[in-house]
Image (cartoon, rainbow, N blue to C red):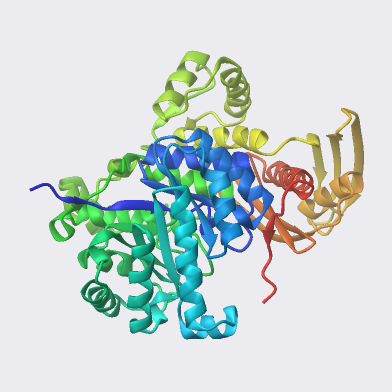
Amino acid sequence: MPNDKVIIFDTTLRDGEQSAGIGLTTHEKMEIAKQLDRLGVDVIEAGFAASSPGDFEAVQAIAREVRRPIIASLARCVLPDVDAAWGAIKDAAHPRIHVFISSSDVQIMHQLRRNPEEVMEMAIAAVERAKSYCDDVEFSPMDATRTDMDFLYKMLEGVIAAGANTINIPDTVGYIYPWEFRERLRLIKENVSNFDQAVLSVHCHNDLGQAVSNSLAAVVEGARQVEGCINGLGERAGNAALEEVIMGLETRKDLYKVDTNIDTRQIYRTSRLVSDITGFAVQPNKAIVGANAFRHASGIHQDGILKERSTFEIMDPQSIGWPNNKLVLGKLSGRAGLRSRLEELGYNLEKEALNEAFEEFKLLADRKPEVTDTDLESLMSSQRRTVDVPSIYQLEHVQVSCGNREIPTATITIIDPDGRSITDAATGTGPVDAVYKAINRMVNVPNKLTEYRVDAVTEGIDALGDVTIRIEKDNKAYVGRGSDVDIIVASAKAYMNALNRLLATESTRPAAEVPTS
Ligand code: KIV
Ligand code: ZN
């Protein structure tokens, strides 16, 4: 008998985007959605259409363009939300409306300030409304793991009867442990009379570090949809990291005996793309996708690996698309060599984009003789940034003088929105501060720098430096990234990227809210 399939439901663009400090443009969301499609996820929750015009626009754009997976929009159990969700996804090849409402006493009493009967009525009315639009309706009782069980049974029975075909049990506050979760799910199966008419789904948060374990325990108990985010993004401590759930199911098929539709070779690339676009770094020791996940430091382990890989490796790095990072190109490599290597990495560029990439590649190869796959990935992500975020101001020239007995001074030239070249200079406490002050004198958008990080993209003294910054204005955060072999230039590029994002998004859509508590 074939194994059951587990539906992989990705909510990186909805719950993931709720992470404090993430605010994505529609273009960036579209890029992530297309990569999730390549990864093979079954459902993409593209956003929460009623929450803002920007979210509506992004959900609608993804629904129209990404045709294989189910495209879902979240909606509260209020009719205008359900209408907005449908408005955004109605052009999808496979639309889904996902409605949710609080079900625990504490949330019903203190947040909704209603009584349980009213909540039940709202849930049923919302499912009925959603069902009037589309056949695929998911229902989530928020805070289900702290909800009175009898109320939960009644609520689930009611929404299934009203037409919900997926019932999702969220551990909204990341409170439960795997054995308790299994027991709750077992009781739900036993006590919800029409349970067999819906797919059981779970959505686990990671406040106590159990999100992946709870999700996998739920699969053992019969869950056939798992929700999560790439790199474990999401509210507070995040959601179940989908790459961990997927590789858990894959590596321990002997235990779980289920299949997914995922092309695991796309995992690494998806993780990098999400990290690059959101500016949320992946910790080096993170399971599956961390930089050290397949690195063996101890001599005994290295010896074992050389003799037989499976002595210390339970997964083949190639199976998640880990780059082999061989030396690939150098100063004398031509356009055809670059194109063919980029194609092997999954980038099929049109002529103009290839020409631009080649120009950048030549500049890089002049300064860094050994260009690796990781350098190329970084180069492609820099190119993407200029497409994702309009270059309202462009950085033209950076010159800095600094030293232990110098006052750090930066002279910067930028091209303004009218195409004029302007130059100004400033001093600062350090070279980066001087650069940012010089740029501020010309761009003149008050903001606060809240995060500044430099990562080396590759090893060695000539490594590309990748700078990630976050700036805040009016309680909203904007990420900026820049790469260069010179980290001061990379810092200037990152700042311009953040300022351009701020200027571009400020007038069109709300950016990420900075939590006030
Ligand atoms: O964590 C949660 O309860 C949610 C629901 C909206 C599914 O994100
Ligand atoms: Zn959630």
Residue beneath the point at 71% across and 54% down: 510
Residue at far left of view: 1
Q: Name which quarter of the figure residue 19 lies in.
A: bottom right
Q: Is residue 214 above or below residue 282?
A: below
Residue 134: percent from left, percent from top:
44, 48
Q: Name which quarter of the figure residue 146 lies in.
A: bottom left
Identify which residue, 9 or 104, lies in the foreground.
Answer: 104
Residue beneath the point at 32% across and 65% down: 215
Tally the marks: 0
Q: Is residue 11 visible?
A: no
Residue 207: percent from left, percent from top:
45, 74
Residue 275: percent from left, percent from top:
52, 50
Image quadrant occupied by the C terminus: bottom right
Residue 59: percent from left, percent from top:
56, 45
Q: Is residue 158 shown left or right of residue 380?
A: left
Residue beneath the point at 34% across and 57% down: 165
Q: Is residue 434 shown left or right of residue 513?
A: right
Q: Is residue 277 shown left or right of residue 327?
A: right
Q: Is residue 167 above or below residue 315?
A: below
Q: Is residue 385 visible?
A: yes
Residue beneath the point at 53% across and 69% down: 236
